[in-house]
Amino acid sequence: MIPRRRQAVPEPRYGLLRRLGRADRWAFDRVAAARLRGLEYVLPRLSRFADHGVLWFTSAGVMGATGRPRLRRAALRGSIAIAVASPAVNILGKQAFRRKRPVVDLVPPIRIRWKLPTSHAFPSGHSASAAAFATGVALEAPRRVAAPVAATAAAVAFSRVYTGAHYPGDVLAGVGIGALAALGTRLVWPARPPVARVARTEDAADAVADDGTGLVAVVNPVSGGSGGATAAILPGRPELAVELLERELPAAEIVRLGPDEDADKVFDEAAGRAAVLAVIGGDGTVNAGARAALEHGVPLLVVPTGTFDHFARAIGVESAAQAIAAYRGGRVGRVDVSYVTPVTGGAAGGAAGDQFGEEERLFLNTASLGAYTELVVRRERLERRIGKWPALAVAAVRTLRHSEPVALTVDGRERRVWLAFVGNCVYGSRGAAPTWRDRLDDGRLDVRMIATGRRVPRVRAVAAVMAGHLRVIPGYRAWRATGLEVASRSGDLRLARDGEVSALPAAVRFGKHAGALAVFTPVDAG
């Protein structure tokens, strides 16, 4: 009998893990034997400072204290990412793999200044937190902030190997988990583009002067809550912006709005003698300046000093210094302007075209009806004191507890509308307080409405508003349009436009002036 030849048994999968383990230990030994001049002192202390996320939460606090919206969002997203990554690594990962810490015989004692950790090695918790925070910041912050944070995170990750706390494989796994945790935050909180895209027009070099000749700036001294009890002690944002403007553009004319002056008249007179009209104020003031700029055909320069500055942030201008840089850069883009106007005799005054009707009420951001009006007013009243999300929660509870549907006719169809929102261009976020857009020149209105013939479940409605998922509420509708007609069957309409609440006749029409407003944008804007 001829004996059978034994078939070659394939190497078990654990053979690959053994090879990876040997490579990991070899890489650790190489790093342990390395002598990097200057880092022997820095890296151990950096690694120590990153214990328990102290380094990253301190960084988040500093970014939040700047008051810059993008940096506040970056700090919050990075902190949330750490809150997701840290339990995933320390509770799940380490307990699942139970890898022992490296033997530190080759690591110089100068690098091991503190007691080595006794928990399991794989994956690295420090590296996961570092990558989570750095990735979260990169999703929101400008490059000049994200790059140093990423470099610091890389140094922390490397320090875990350099000080003998982890193998390189532990660090790589931690980095991967941290980055995925940060990217996963976009599933519940989409990252907003830093700047809305605007079609670029020709350069406005003929309207720009080095000393600001031809620039007329109208300033609202009380924008952003300035002018209160602290005005005599500390200058508000408008006064600081004026000081910078006078220093950088000494030939510019500064016009201050008085408390009893007609803003529309002041802007009209200023635009009539300006080559460039500048607005120093918040969204309501920018709205008034936009109308004057449209009527006189001059470009608008937005200098943000308000509480929210939604439009300024959308075009990428978050400070007076950035506004001045945009003016000197001479880059002008054209953005859409939406309007609401009374319907008289079946026709709307001031239809879209070259002329702007006197009855048109313009808005650059949003207009809202029904419970939205009360919710927006309450939220913006509280937001400055307690923050956006707490303010939204309180406003939602107070508003939704007492609100009732309003009988409206929308584009010829009778509806009982609980709340309605009309955005100038399509908004990216889907919640009750959308704040960002991808474009400012798409020619469309973003219409969102909850129309229901029955009472809306209050608890469910509040939860939907807070979670940003209005579509789970019965009767939710969303569509894009170039025009919209709304008529109230019970009297005048109460409408909030760019944060300003006003009463309008019972029948109105929403429309667009596509690409009508010329506005200075940063040179590096999309």
Image (tube, rainbow, N blue to C red):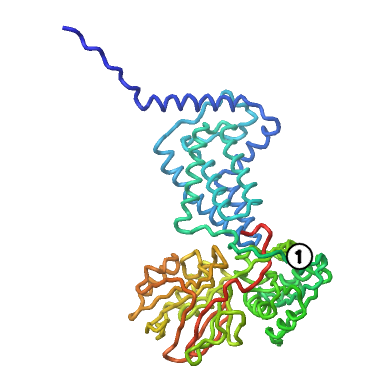
Residue type highlighted by circle 1: Ala
Image point 50% across, 68% down: which residue?
A: 426
> What residue sits right under mark 1 in the picture?
205
In the picture shown, does residue 289 fall above or below 472? Answer: below
Image point 57% across, 52% down: which residue?
A: 137
Of 308 and 314, nearer the camera is 314
* Residue 324 visible, this angle: yes
Instruction: Please identify the quarter of the rendering in which residue 297 is found.
Output: bottom right
Instruction: Please identify the quarter of the rendering in which residue 460 is found.
Output: bottom left
Q: Residue furthest left?
A: 1
Q: Position of residue 223 (x, y in %)?
A: 67, 75
Query: On the rendered structure, is 181 left or right of 69?
Result: left
Query: On the rendered structure, is 110 left or right of 376?
Result: right
Image point 27% across, 17% down: which residue?
A: 7
Q: Position of residue 57 (x, y in %)?
A: 58, 52
Quadrant of the snapshot with the C terminus: bottom right
Q: Position of residue 278 (x, y in %)?
A: 72, 73
In the picture shown, does residue 136 fall above or below 287? Answer: above
Instruction: Please identify the quarter of the rendering in which residue 50 is found.
Output: top right
Quadrant of the snapshot with the N terminus: top left
Of 44 and 304, nearer the camera is 304
